[in-house]
Image (tube, helix red, strand yellow):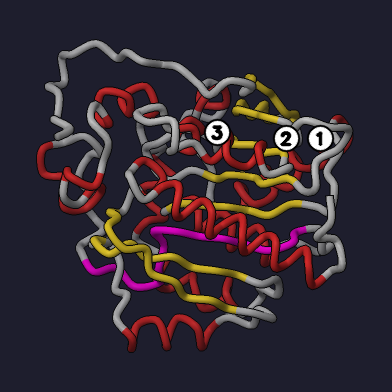
Amino acid sequence: MARLETPGMQRTYATRTSGVTDVTLDAGGVTLSGLHIEPPGPSPRAVVVAVHGGGMTAGYFDGQAHPSVSLLGLGARLGFAVLSLDRPGYGRSAREIPYGQSLTEQSATLHAALDDYARRFPTGAGFLLVAHSFGGKVALTAAADDERGRLIGLDISGCGHRYATDSREPPGVLARDSWKWHWGPLRLYPPNSFRYSRPLLAPMPLVEEQELRQWSQSFPGVAARVRVPVRFTFAEYENWWLHDADALADMTSHLRSTTVTMDRQPDAGHNISLGWAARSYHLRVLAFLEELLARRGQAGA
């Protein structure tokens, strides 16, 4: 069983999946760092853009506790480029904007980063945003602001619209009181998951912390402007958000997307992409992308 290390232990195992490289993008004057992988062949079928949650970094989507966990590795094997970005206030940009950015500012920064990416790399059919937790708020805001219509869709985990807990004092990701909120039962994770997760952690920027408390009020206005297909996944042991039938019906009622799908991921905690369920969840993400490409007549290689 994975165990929780003490704060004084060294951060180790800062490894990555074979083929994954560092990337930096010019995001309107802000430099965003991240991880990138391209599939074999001349051009990707599409680009999966992974957007991490609060207190994590881009490596969240390239988990190293077990070979099955990485979204980047799986996506590339299925013909997609995968770009996992450090959001504004994380990674390299933490030096430039240590207090972070608001959701509206992060949306603009993300779109500017995608502009730079499209100038430098082939994009195939376009971009699917895959987002976790606070990153889901950024992805929804970016979709609401997508005036050019270049996003294929959104796939979001660990993000609802009404908190099930007091969001004013969220426990730290590896704090001893965080198990219920961030992880759920430890049996859901490969051995040494906490040791491998330490290099992925970063302080949540101040602006982001402040916006935690406003999401329930902001969500209806953002959701009303989202037009692309969106899929939400709630883990079996998700404790941050209300996700009973009534909560999901209310959440869906605010969205104007062409398609809204609500899924459940069994045997998973909030950090789905770091657990044993990661491969199952990531395959569902890419199956959703396959469906969207099929609708566009672009499902072929």
Residue 104: x and y in percent read: 61, 55
- Which residue is depicted at the point 37% across and 31% down? 66
Compare marks 3 and 2 and give the one earlier in the sequence. 2
Residue bearing the label numbered 2: 27
Residue bearing the label numbered 3: 86
Please identify the quarter of the rendering in which residue 268 is found.
Answer: bottom left
Give above or below for 126 relative to 115.
below
CB atoms of marks 1 and 2 within 8 Å? yes
Please identify the quarter of the rendering in which residue 204 is found.
Answer: top left
Q: CA distance from mark 1 to mark 2?
A: 7 Å
Q: Secondary structure at mark 3?
A: loop
Q: Is residue 227 visible?
A: yes
Give above or below for 283 relative to 261.
above
Compare marks 1 and 2 and give the one earlier in the sequence. 2
Q: Is residue 202 visible?
A: no
Name which residue type carries label 2.
Ala
- Which residue is depicted at the point 33% across and 45% down? 276
Q: Residue 175 or 127: which is nearer the viewer?
A: 127
For the residues carrying marks 3 and 2, which lies nearer the camera in this image? 3
The region drawn magenta spans: 151-164
Image label count: 3
- Which residue is depicted at the point 13% across and 30% down? 3
Residue 160 lies in magenta, yes or no?
A: yes
Name which residue type carries label 1.
Asp
Residue 90: x and y in percent read: 49, 31
Q: If the image is split into quadrants, where does the N terminus sit?
A: top left
Residue 259: x and y in percent read: 64, 79
Q: CA distance from mark 1 to mark 3?
A: 15 Å
Residue 293 — which label?
none
Residue bearing the label numbered 1: 116
Compare marks 1 and 3 and give the one earlier in the sequence. 3
